Image (tube, rainbow, N blue to C red):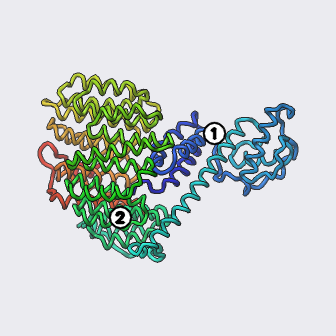
Amino acid sequence: MPDKNCEHRLRYGAIQSIWQSSGSVNPGDNARDNIGELNMCTKRWSRVAVFTALLFSALWTWQPSGSLAAATIPEDIDEPTVSAPVANPVDDFTLLLIKRMQKALITIGIFAGPVNGIADDETTRAVRQYQRSTRQTPTGIIDEKLVIHLETAVSVSNLLDTLSLARQAHTKEAREALLANPATKDLITEGLSDEVANPVRDPSACFTEPTVRCLLDEAVESAKAITRDDMRNWAFGDILVAQARAGLSADARDTMRRISDPRMIMVALGEIAEARARAGQAESAIAAVDVIPDMATRSEAYANIANTLASAGLKQGVISAVAKLRDQVDLDNIDAKAVAQLTRASAALFQCGNTEDGVALLEEAESAANSIADINNRDTALRHVADTNAGIGRIDQAITILNTIESPSERMPVLMSTARAQAQKGDPDAALELASSIEAVRYRALVLASIAEGQAQIGNLQAAQITLENATADMEAIDLPYAKDFATSRIAMAYARIASDMDQPSPAMFDQATSLTDGIKDNKTRAYAAWNISFYNQQSGVGEAAETRAHAYAVTNEIPSPGGQAWLLAELAEKRTTDGHGEWAWEMFDRALGITESIKNAWGRARALSRLSQTLVRLVETKAVHGPITSNEATSKEATSSE
């Protein structure tokens, strides 16, 4: 389920960076690494919150003992109670510095005052206590660096307290809304959330002859064994999605009653509706959304199912879902999130061929975005409108809107989506010109990889090769480790995709793709790229599919978490099924199933099982052939299982 546990990620992502940075040459490196997790939170929490948490972790150069307020740490009574050395107390700067320290110490509860700018015994004792709590040498000396660190810590602590209060308020509101609705009040229960797993169950038969039902039953039992409420709720959320996708509505409703967080129950109702939409049940999906008591969640769900129904080609269902969404939105009191929902709805109308209504809704969304008074909110809203215009091929409109957006951070996604759209429409020169205006190499590298694919599609392979070389050069200049890995994976896959589409596939380009992939540090990112290169290799028929698949399995084995291995293989198996390669899909499913059987961690096991059940649904739906991989695809299961 998207964006769950965002506050947890914000709080502990910052703390993890702080702990990891102890003793490192550059403490900021670990903080920057956490951006891969923390940036997902910006959808629900403010950019200020994430920035502050990252700033906190980057500035901190010592390792905390766990709590910001050090009141529980006893004072060292053997230390002399004399004032620590400090600069001339008559100096105005020093006076202000001591006052700032005293105010911050009062905030965290280890100093009672007064705030007088004098480094007396009480002030010095409090400074030492704080230094001990953060594992510094307790000198009691006040300097600007120490004051800035403490003030930053206080700011982050206050921010997280504010987020916690907001979470409590939203939880209460969600609970009250669910209880007030006759259709949802029975979902609030105290009993099912306290269930325990059956300790004598034997799931071995399910792993021998798996069915969707038995996989989900075992997932439920595994989730019951999770002790932390947030992780337990997350696992049940995954299970609920799988149950809904499998058409097990009654089971899904029981699972909802096991979720203790009312906010997640709201989201779960939307997940059930989307699963019904994926099954082509338009009326049932819309009816499921209708009972969601929270208007914001309900609006989001209407937008979701509109896009899902559009992908299935169910035009009338799309029209009905969009009409429901439009009734929810107050154009006179709109925000960026509501504008985003309208733009997604307009894209759904375009996708199902209702161009006239799609244009009208998109223009309505643009007008509403321009009416937003707050400039930051307005820029975000306009970014959604511009992105949608680019996505449906209205490039001139996207560029016009781009020129009205002031925030650089909101302009960047539009620059990227517009350049990609230009390349896809066969205008790589315009795309390259736009890409040249992207200053950040981590973004420009991604756009150039997309442009290269567009150049290859119109037959300009030489230009595509040059563009990929430029993308690689930009990738090499990226400082952030995860951003560099992500860009590398996209460039490598672009090489492989272009090579597979050539009239005479190029083994050299496949070798280049593999070489780039081997330089990726993140295990999951490297494995995902390796598998996609293997898929393109098999598609090209160059005769190296067996070797590239064996390499992909080997890279997958390097993922430290068995749950991560199983999840990736299950996800890729579903992709192979969709692409019409049932033999590959079944082999990867069987491999993931074997890994999952060995997982002992309840949370990892529950999530892997729920993912496997969704893959199995897809395998059954497509009637994928369950047999050995033949011809140039062959690397036997025996060979891969012996790794």
Residue 505 x %, y %: 16, 31
Which disc number belongs to residue 61?
1
Disc tally is 2
Q: Nearer the viewer, residue 608 or 642?
A: 608
Which disc number belongs to residue 239?
2
Residue 529 x %, y %: 31, 40
Picture quadrant of residue 383:
top left
Q: Nearer the viewer, residue 440 or 178?
A: 178
Residue 158 x %, y %: 64, 51
Q: Nearer the viewer, residue 77 or 273?
A: 273
Circle 2 — which element? helix
Q: Amino acid at mark 2?
A: Ile
Q: Amino acid at mark 1?
A: Thr
Residue 599 seen in this snapshot: no
Q: CA distance from mark 1 to mark 2?
A: 41 Å
Answer above or below: position of 96 versus 305: above
